[in-house]
Structures are given as structure tokens and as C-alpha cells.
Amino acid sequence: MTMKFDAQGLIPAIVQHAQTKEVLTLAYMNEQSYTKTMETGETWFYSRSRQELWHKGATSGHTQKVVAMRLDCDGDALVVEVLPNGPACHTGEESCFHEIVKEKDSAIGSLDILSTLKEVIANREVDMPEGAYTTYLFTEGIDKIGKKVGEEATEVVIAAKNCDAEELKWEAADLMYHLLVLLQEQKLDLYEVLSVLQKRHEK
């Protein structure tokens, strides 16, 4: 499909974190910035206010490595998936979309929670806040963590055998939490595990 630039020679580019899928910013590209993005593997945009090209992170160091780009069905908008080297927003926030207009309903599950929980667990290992269950697990070490993963896996199987969806939901959540703790203790990033699943899927 042919890329369609508007009357000003621009196309909107939605920048998205390639791992967490969080939308980081909305910027614009012209043909030149698009070409430079493709050539360098890092995001380049066109500033409508300054009317000039700009390389994201050229000053701050917060560059964005491009891992994928997708064109919408009309050919007039891009999604740019990146691995950011720091915050996307000039305010220091990870995303430019950090102002809450409406809170997400907690009853609506989202894969975003895995990334959030991963970061919380990593911070717990560093800060080791007194009284926190995660602190207790890290203090006890791999034997305790491994035992808990095994116990929770068994509880998942029992809930499934009982055909108890409500119980299975809670036990599966417990298993996923303890597995994330285990990965953190072993210094194996969750995204490395997900990359294995991605490679298997591609086969």
C-alpha cells in the first residue's frame, strides 16, 4: 500500500513501546524524517511548530530504537513500535499520555499488569520494604520461591480438575505472580521468555 501524506506532506506516527504496548507519543513524519528513520533505525520526526526535522533523543539521549512499523488500512497513519532508551515525554514521564482523564475499570483485565507487576517486583528486590510478602520471598531465596511456584502450579491443576473457574482464576494469578518473582530472582527478563514464545509462534 502507498503511504499517504497529507496536504502539508505529513503523516501521523503513533509511537508504541514494543514490549509493554504502551502508547508513548503521537508525532508526525514527512518523507525525509520517514527515510531517516528507516535508514538509522531510530525515530526521526518533523516538528510542526519549529518546521524542522528532529531526532528523538538527540539532546536528551532518550533515543527510540525502531523494531517494527505498521501502516493503517487507509495508508494515512503509522504505528511505530520502539524500544525506548528513557522517557518519551519531555516532562520526564515514560509516556506523553500520562494525564488521567478516566481511570481504567479494575474489572477489565489487561496484559499491561504483567509489565507493571514485573517492575514492582524488581523494585521490591532493591528496596526490600519491611513486611512485604515479596521481600520475604527474596529473603528466603530460590528454595522458597521454587517451592511456592510448585505449590501454586498444583493448586492450578486442582482448580481445573474441580472445574471451578472462580478458584482457577485466583490460583492462576498466584502462579503468575510467583513465576515473575522466580524470574526476577534468576535475573531472567520476562520479555526473554516472551521472545521464546514469539519465535515458536513464527515457526
Image: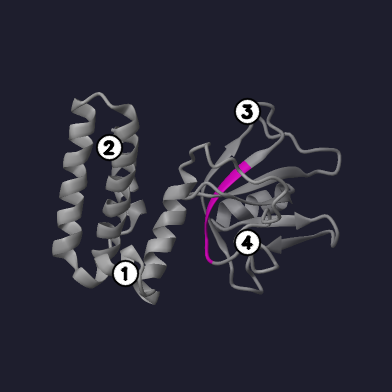
Numbered label attached to residue 88:
4
Q: Which badge, 3 or 4, comes first in the chain's sequence? A: 3
Q: Which badge, 2 or 1, comes first in the chain's sequence? A: 1
The residue nearer to you, when weighing 162 against 139, is 162
Is label 2 or label 4 in front?
A: 4
User: What SS does tag 3 mark?
Assistant: loop
Residue wearing tag 1 = 135
Residue type, label 4:
Ala
Residue type, label 2:
Arg
| Residue 80 covered by magenta stretch | yes
User: What SS does tag 4 mark?
Assistant: loop
Compute the Cα span from label 2 to label 4: 31 Å
User: What SS does tag 2 mark?
Assistant: helix
**Dot 2 and dot 1 residues touching (CB under 8 Å):** no
Q: How is the image coloured?
A: one colour
**Dot 1 and dot 4 residues touching (CB under 8 Å):** no
Compute the Cα span from label 3 to label 4: 29 Å
Residue positioned most to the top: 163
Horizontal relation, residue 197 to residue 43: left or right: left
* Placement of 136 over or under 165, stated as above or below: below
Residue wearing tag 2 = 200
Determine the residue positioned at 19% across, 54% down: 148
Quarter of the image for the C terminus: give it: top left
Quarter of the image for the N terminus: give it: top right
Q: Which badge, 1 or 4, comes first in the chain's sequence? A: 4
Compute the Cα span from label 2 to label 1: 34 Å
Numbered label attached to residue 1:
3
Determine the residue positioned at 68% across, 31% down: 75
The magenta stretch spans which residues? 79-85
* Image-quadrant location for residue 11: top right
The percent coordinates of residue 39 (x first, y second) are: 57, 54
Residue type, label 3:
Met
